[in-house]
Image: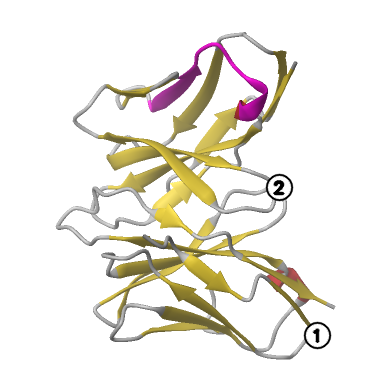
Amino acid sequence: DAGVTQSPTHLIKTRGQQVTLRCSPKSGHDTVSWYQQALGQGPQFIFQYYEEEERQRGNFPDRFSGHQFPNYSSELNVNALLLGDSALYLCASSWRTTGGDQPQHFGDGTRLSIL
Amino acid sequence: KQEVTQIPAALSVPEGENLVLNCSFTDSAIYNLQWFRQDPGKGLTSLLLIQSSQREQTSGRLNASLDKSSGRSTLYIAASQPGDSATYLCATISGGSYIPTFGRGTSLIVHP
């Protein structure tokens, strides 16, 4: 039973470029959430996708966008990269219930470095 | 806006000690609280999930308690081992929004 998988594991970009990160949820999960974790900080919630729609969004600018596919996998896109976007980007999946009372399962993340 | 604070930020102990990690939150209207473990450069592993109606959860040597009225949760680790060395994070999900808020974590080192 594969867990949450993310690709790529590491990525180096320059300011102003665009990047796409990918996530495949754990088998049986239908909800995907994305987080940004700066060094020494806790993860910050970016947004959550369920049934191919963005359901919740944290305090992130429109440069951050996403998509969920019919097979529940998801992409995170970041445009016009800034130095401050350097972070570990984590994807988490869960089985959507009426109350969000299921634990989330996390992937190992994509380490994004902006030069 | 929910704020989650974890104390201490770092902890170094000899093997065998019993430990208490603290997590406090400002808004008591939470749906649940979850404790995670994060190894360096890795993702998060869920340890314990406590629903708002529960007072504690146990898994092996780990026990987490929740006191919503005082805005506190503690993670108790019994008989610590070097393999317990990691960063421990707590996160709350606020009622209604289901947006999780994480603390900065407690970095734990257990030396032999």
Q: Is residue B101 left or right of residue A18?
A: left
Is A93 in front, or is B21?
Answer: A93
Callout 1: chain: A
Q: Quadrant of residue B66?
A: top left
Mark 1 or 2, nearer chain start: 1
Query: Is disc 2 placed on a helix, strand or loop?
Result: loop
- B50, above or below A50, in the image: above
Q: Position of residue B58 (x, y in %)?
A: 34, 22
Is residue B74 within the magenta segment? yes
- B21 left or right, relative to B101: right
Residue that carries the numbered disc 2 in the rendered image: A40
How far apart are the two marked residues, 1 and 2, measured between alpha carbons? 22 Å
Q: Residue, x 45% and y 22% (percent of image)?
A: B74
Classify 10 Å Cα crowding around label 1: few (below 14), some (14-19), many (20 and above). Answer: few
**In the image, farthest residue toward the top:** B17
Tell me if residue B106 is in the magenta stretch: no
Q: Is residue A59 visible?
A: no
Q: Residue furthest front?
A: A1
* Vertical arrangement, residue A79 with respect to residue A112, above or below: below
Residue A13 on image: x %, y %: 77, 83
Q: Residue at x 30, y 82 (%)?
A: A71
Q: Which chain letter matches label 2?
A: A
Which mark, residue A14? 1
Highlighted magenta segment, given as a residue range: B71-83
Name the quarter where the C terminus of chain B is drawn.
top right
- Please indicate whether residue A96 sits to the left or right of residue B42 in the image: left
